[in-house]
Image (spheres, grey):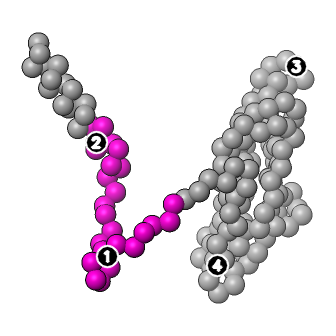
């Protein structure tokens, strides 16, 4: 019995070490043998860093993500930063999407997926959402007939 418990403990410890390491391969040290310190990613609650400028001056589009309703719900969004947090409704986020040459051809996806709210009939439903690009509504959902959220691929 003791051997079985010891073996299981060793296996669990090895599994934790493998998972904890993430399987990422180490970067090779630059010439001279000294490894450069890597910047630590910081989390900006409520604010996202500006999108990286595209090489060659890509096309810029003003994007607004909106979620309607009242109360609080989880909101997941991407395209102008990304996040998944509890938000007070109504909620909106705006920013600039700068598309690279490749993104102008294949598209640049922006999306918002709201959580549930209590509808007028007392039943749970997805909160309504809207995406505007350059002031024009390009995607919207009432949360009832379409419960997949809102997404839109910006192309040039």
Name the secondary structure under disc 2.
helix
Quarter in which the N terminus is drawn: top left
Q: Viewer-nearest of labels 4 and 3?
A: 4
Q: Earlier in the sequence, mark 3 or mark 1?
A: 1
- Above or below, 135 against 124 in this view is below
Where are the magenta residues, as a range? 15-40
Residue at the spot of label 1: 34
Is 137 or 18 nearer to us in this picture?
A: 18
Determine contact: label 1, label 2, CB under 8 Å: no
Q: Position of residue 67 (x, y in %)?
A: 82, 43
Q: Is residue 138 visible?
A: no
Q: Secondary structure at mark 4?
A: loop
If you read the primary sequence from the N terminus, does the residue marked by circle 3 or circle 2 appear first? 2
Q: Residue at x 73, y 55 (%)?
A: 47
Q: Position of residue 16 (x, y in %)?
A: 30, 37
Q: Main secondary structure of the magenta part?
A: loop
Separation of residues labelled 3 and 2 (CA atoms): 50 Å
Number of the label disc, if any, that sits on residue 16: none
Residue at 88% in and 32% down: 70
The x and y percentages for residue 102 are: 59, 76
Find disc 2 in the rendering and name its residue: 17
Report x, y in % for residue 117.
Answer: 79, 28
Q: Earlier in the sequence, mark 4 or mark 3?
A: 4
Can you tell which quarter of the image residue 138 is in? bottom right
Q: Secondary structure at mark 3?
A: loop
Residue behind mark 3: 121
């Amino acid at each position: 019995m003791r051997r079985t418990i010891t073996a299981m403990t060793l296996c669990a410890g090895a599994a934790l070490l493998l998972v904890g390491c993430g399987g990422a391969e180490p970067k090779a040290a630059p010439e001279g043998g000294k490894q450069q310190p890597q910047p630590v990613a910081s989390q900006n609650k409520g604010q996202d860093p500006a999108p990286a400028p595209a090489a060659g001056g890509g096309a810029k589009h003003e994007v607004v993500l909106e979620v309607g309703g009242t109360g609080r719900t989880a909101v997941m969004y991407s395209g102008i930063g990304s996040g998944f947090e509890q938000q007070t409704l109504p909620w909106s986020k705006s920013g600039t999407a700068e598309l690279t040459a490749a993104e102008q051809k294949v598209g640049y996806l922006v999306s918002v997926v709201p959580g549930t709210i209590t509808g007028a009939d007392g039943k749970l439903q997805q909160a309504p959402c809207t995406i505007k690009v350059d002031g024009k509504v390009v995607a919207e959902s009432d949360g009832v007939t379409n419960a997949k959220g809102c997404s839109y691929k910006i192309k040039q």
